[in-house]
Image (cartoon, rainbow, N blue to C red):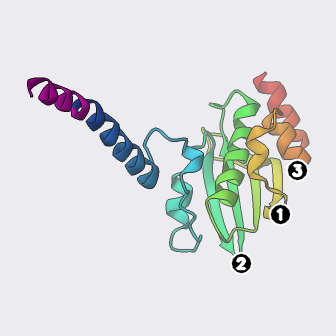
Amino acid sequence: MKWKRIFLILVIMLIIPFVLSSFFHLEFKETGSIFSDEKEMTKEVIQLTESNIVDFMSDLPLQSNLSKVGWDHSTLSIDLNISGQIKDPNLVYRDLYTILQLGFEDTSNVKLILIRVFEYNQFDGSHKKLLMTIDASAGRWSEEMDQIENSYEELLSTFFKLKTTDYWEQWMNDIL
């Protein structure tokens, strides 16, 4: 009788961890684990409007300064200023890519993004030199662009209408 109790307790002790772990595993599958891949989690996609455009744009992690933002019938237009603090042209291209990525992936109604990049003179506040423009259509955007092993400049010029000016070449020569 004593051995039966010991055997029964031993079996129960072995079964309880397996049962509890299966419940724990099921709960994480249903609710989503904090350790799961972020891409598996659903993103909140917003509809951009005049009332939330400021919040959306202020959340963008940019090195360049926002100068002007416009919203008109599914078209987002942005003016960026770059100052002497930016010493790497790749930072400018990364900012452009970031705007396009968040604009097309995190919103449901942006169809076209127009960006102009100006040189900003922080001493006198002038920003009259247009350095580059990009005209990006949502139809040309693909979420798989993150997987492409090209530079931001190559991605942007391959998939979108990226135009640089002579001032851009001069600006790059001045900083490099």
- In percent of width and height, residue 48 lies at 59, 70
Choose between 3 and 72: the one closer to the eye.
Answer: 3
- Could you give the CA–CA distance between mark 2 and mark 3, rounded to whole angstroms? 23 Å
First along the sequence among labels 1 and 2: 2
Q: Look at the image and tell me whether residue 162 can be seen.
A: no
The nearer-to-camera label among 1 and 2 is: 1
- Residue at x 78% of width, y 63% of height: 138
Q: Main secondary structure of the magenta part?
A: helix
- Residue at x 72% of width, y 28% of height: 88
Identified by mark 2, the residue type is: His
- Residue at x 83% of width, y 63% of height: 139
Q: Which residue is mark 2?
A: 73
The nearer-to-camera label among 2 and 3 is: 3
Identified by mark 3, the residue type is: Phe
Please provide the residue range marked out in magenta: 1-12
As drawn, the label of residue 159 is 3
- Residue at x 70% of width, y 48% of height: 127
Q: Is residue 54 above or below residue 116?
A: below
First along the sequence among labels 2 and 3: 2
Q: Look at the image and tell me whether residue 75 can be seen.
A: yes
- Could you give the CA–CA distance between mark 1 and mark 2, rounded to whole angstroms? 16 Å
Choose between 36 and 1: the one closer to the eye.
Answer: 1
Q: Which residue is mark 1?
A: 139
Q: Are marks 1 and 3 in contact (CB under 8 Å)?
A: no
